Image (cartoon, coloured by chain):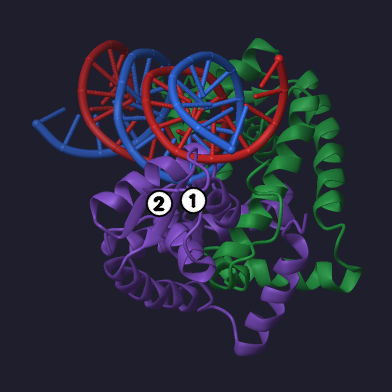
Chain colours: A purple, B green, C red, D blue
DNA sequence: CTCATGTCAGATCAACTGAAATGG
DNA sequence: CCCATTTCAGTTTATCTGACATGA
């Protein structure tokens, strides 16, 4: 955290949205990663467990679409989740190319632990903002994030 | 850009600031990188040239502090800028451990080209927002970016 | 034949680490 | 001796590419 520790002194950077976005993201990402690591998880795991819980059992390609992960990364992350018995992979009887991935009881319990963790992270990230400002920035970021 | 092309369908992600920040940053970063690449430059180059122009000739360690770059990355990026004759490195007579790095005329002209490029990028990134919203988000991001 | 799916090995890129060489 | 500066080689992490095998 040594080379990103202070608001830029450079006029060319310190007011530019791309720079501010990058610094804010770096800080948010550091807080998130550390919190997930403390729970023995990574962002990919949370996104996959969330996709499974919200969508129900499904194929790896569909999971990648939902969690916005590359299929190859889905594959690796599911290996990791499988090792911890948080998901199960079984063949799809209707299409033998596919795996049907299912979240297990222990996956659900991990997910709800991570839900609390990630909520706490939002609070930590938004700490410098008032309640009104928090609503505003969520709104503005939603407009900036790609919609298609 | 295949796996980050649409607003998340997952309720757990689509309203969370860390997620929105990450997606907005990914989009902004892609736009910026492509624009800089079209000019034959990288973000590190722009930051270094900006630091040199705003601060005057200085050492690599100081450049790293100003441009928020690791000293090893400063070194590599200065090699690249030196190859294009955009900066010159000379020994500091008062402290022979140091290099005094100076921006050249061609470095200044690259910098002013990149200034326009980067300004255009801000416009492209902020395209979904009104003028008022643009001021608001800059303000809010400044509060979120680390100040120390 | 083609297309989709899962799998694997590795490429890429920004950021960082550790250590050596030189000098204050 | 200790500390600062530059330099180099290499690690890490997230993301993406390309190829391949299997099967629809």
Q: Label 2 belongs to which residue?
A: A1
Dot 1 surroundings within 10 Å: few (below 14), some, or many (20 or more)?
A: some
SS class of the residue under badge 1?
loop
x and y percentages locating residue B130 in the rendered image: 90, 68
Q: Which residue is painted at 46% across and 48% down in the image?
A: A92
Residue A112 rendering spot, x and y as whole percentages: 36, 76
Q: Are marks 1 and 2 on the same chain?
A: yes
Disc assigned to residue A135: none
**Callouts 1 and 2 close, C-beta under 8 Å:** yes
Look at mark 1 in the image and give the residue it sits on: A4
Q: Chain of mark 2?
A: A
Q: In the picture shown, does residue B43 fall above or below B11?
A: above
Task: Locate the C terminus of chain A and report the quarter of the image it occupies.
Answer: bottom right
C-alpha distance separating marks 1 and 2: 6 Å
Mark 2 Cα shell of 10 Å, populated few (<14), some (14-19), many (≥20): few
- Name the one closer to the observer, A83 or B91: A83
Query: As displayed, is residue A67 above or below residue A138?
Result: above
Q: Using the rendered view, name the quadrant where residue B143 is placed.
A: bottom right
Determine if residue A93 is in view.
yes
Q: Chain of mark 1?
A: A
Can residue B88 be seen from the camera position used here? Answer: no
- Is B114 situated left or right of B92 in this image? right
Q: Is residue B115 above or below residue B88?
A: below
State the image coordinates of residue A56 (x, y, percent, origin top left).
49, 66
Q: Answer left or right for A48 relative to B53.
A: left
In the structure shown, which secondary structural element does the residue marked by tag 2 occupy?
A: loop
Residue at horizontal 50 percent and vertical 43 percent from the top: B65
Kindly identify the residue that appears in the image at 33 percent across and 55 percent down.
Answer: A88
What is the total number of numbered labels drawn onto the structure image?
2
Residue C7 position, x and y percent, is 39, 32
Residue farthest bottom in this picture: A131
């Amino acid at each position: 955290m040594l080379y990103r520790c202070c608001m830029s002194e450079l006029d060319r950077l310190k007011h530019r949205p791309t720079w501010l976005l990058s610094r804010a993201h770096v800080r948010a990402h550091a807080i998130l990663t550390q919190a997930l690591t403390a729970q023995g998880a990574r962002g990919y795991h949370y996104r996959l467990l969330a996709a499974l819980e919200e969508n129900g059992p499904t194929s790896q390609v569909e999971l990648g679409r939902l969690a916005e992960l590359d299929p190859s990364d889905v594959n690796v992350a599911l290996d990791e989740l499988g090792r911890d018995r948080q998901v199960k992979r079984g063949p799809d009887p209707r299409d033998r190319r596919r795996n049907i991935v299912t979240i297990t009881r222990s996956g659900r319990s991990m997910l709800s632990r991570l839900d609390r963790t990630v909520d706490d992270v939002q609070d930590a990230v938004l700490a410098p903002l008032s309640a009104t400002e928090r609503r505003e920035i969520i709104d503005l970021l939603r407009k900036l994030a790609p919609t298609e």
